[in-house]
Amino acid sequence: MILFVGPVPTARNERDGMVQRVSAIDQVFSGTARVLIEPSLRRHLRLIPRREVRGELTVYWLNSVLHFPLVLLLTVRSQFIYVHSVYMSLLVLPIYLTQKVVTDLHGAVPEELQSMGHKILGLLYQLVERLVIHRSVSCVYVTQAMAEHVKHKYQSSHKYYVIPIFQNTAAAHLDAYERLGSWQKQPYSVVYSGGVQKWQCVDSMLAAVSKAPVFLDFIFLSGSESHLLFLIRRQHLETRVQVKSVPQSEIGEYYLHASMGFMLRESSVINRVACPTKLSEYLSWGVVPIVMAPDIGDFGREGYKYVTLEDFIAGRLPLAGELDQMRTNNYRVVRRLAAKSNSDMQKLQDHYGVQHNKTCEIGLC
């Protein structure tokens, strides 16, 4: 049995990047008996914890203190333990002292917290991260850039695997387009998919829309539909931007026709080590990203193509043929990164004697 520690995927949280990663990693190990626990310090206070069986996956919602004996029992029975992010590591920290744990560091958590003004929390999670790095039997990173950041930060030489997540829902479409030599895009359609958090740079995005050429069409896909509409109306852009909230399973239909997509991130260590789900989706679906700071994760070193925000606002847009070349290049970048991810995932599975699952998502199968 394999024990995972992380948020339980549900219909309500399926758009969250961390939850999508939990689901994708779990899919790789489908066919193996496994347990997923979602710990909390303040919630899940029932004496007998909530439990749900999903095929060969058993899910528990546990309180880190009240149900710690059960946590220990599950760890003892596990073939190996896989903890998603240092956020979850803090909730099960004692197991790092006695058990062999694989930790998936989803991003630069201490730096993220400090950038949001949470100085004390940032320091706390830096201590947790340091302990986790030195006590984990191995670590999993979303990018090579993240692995190098951690190695430099903690002078660590621990064993690690680089396993980004890439969706396979686009693969059949894009393989067909590659064979046909046509991407069948709407040439002036621009998409945005995401929330309204500070790091999404929504204000910069709306400022770009207000200055962009009038022949461009914009569609924003967001679970924060009402808030986004408020921001758009405040900028008097409601006639230029269409806003929708659609299930994750339907987003591909919009990517299918979009020519370009907003992927605005500031230049920071947080973004330099990240592997945003949105960017990998854009590249997989042939959406050319519009970027403010192009150095994002491993995509830059792999040579992905993009349109700068400055050129976009000025109307210096690639011609249709150039966009097709950029899409083809970007799709090949995704395939190269996916192949590397495949290799490291197989090494991780081999190390723990887990049979490979060939029905998983691209980048993990």
Image (spheres, grey):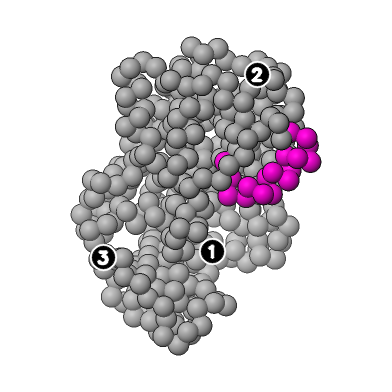
Q: Residue at x 31, y 70 (%)?
A: 53
Residue assigned mark 3? 56
Q: Name the foreground residue: 18 vs 127.
A: 18
Mark 3 lies on a secondary structure that is: loop
Residue assigned mark 1? 87
Residue 216 image offset from top left, x and y in percent: 63, 22
Which amino acid, by three-letter code, is at mark 1?
Tyr
Which amino acid, by three-letter code, is at mark 2?
Phe
Mark 1 lies on a secondary structure that is: helix
Q: Name the foreground residue: 54 vs 344.
A: 54
Q: In the figure, 77 relative to 152: above or below? A: below
Instruction: Name the image quarter holding residue 188.
Output: top right
Q: Is residue 198 magenta?
A: no
Residue extent of the magenta highlight: 221-237
Instruction: Name the image quarter holding residue 325.
Output: top left
Q: In the figure, 150 relative to 73: above or below? A: above
> CA–CA distance between discs 1 and 3?
26 Å
The quarter of the picture where the C terminus appears is top left
Which amino acid, by three-letter code, is at mark 3?
Glu
Residue assigned mark 2? 215
Outermost residue to the bottom: 47
Residue 341 visible at all: yes
Q: Residue at x 62, y 39 (%)?
A: 243
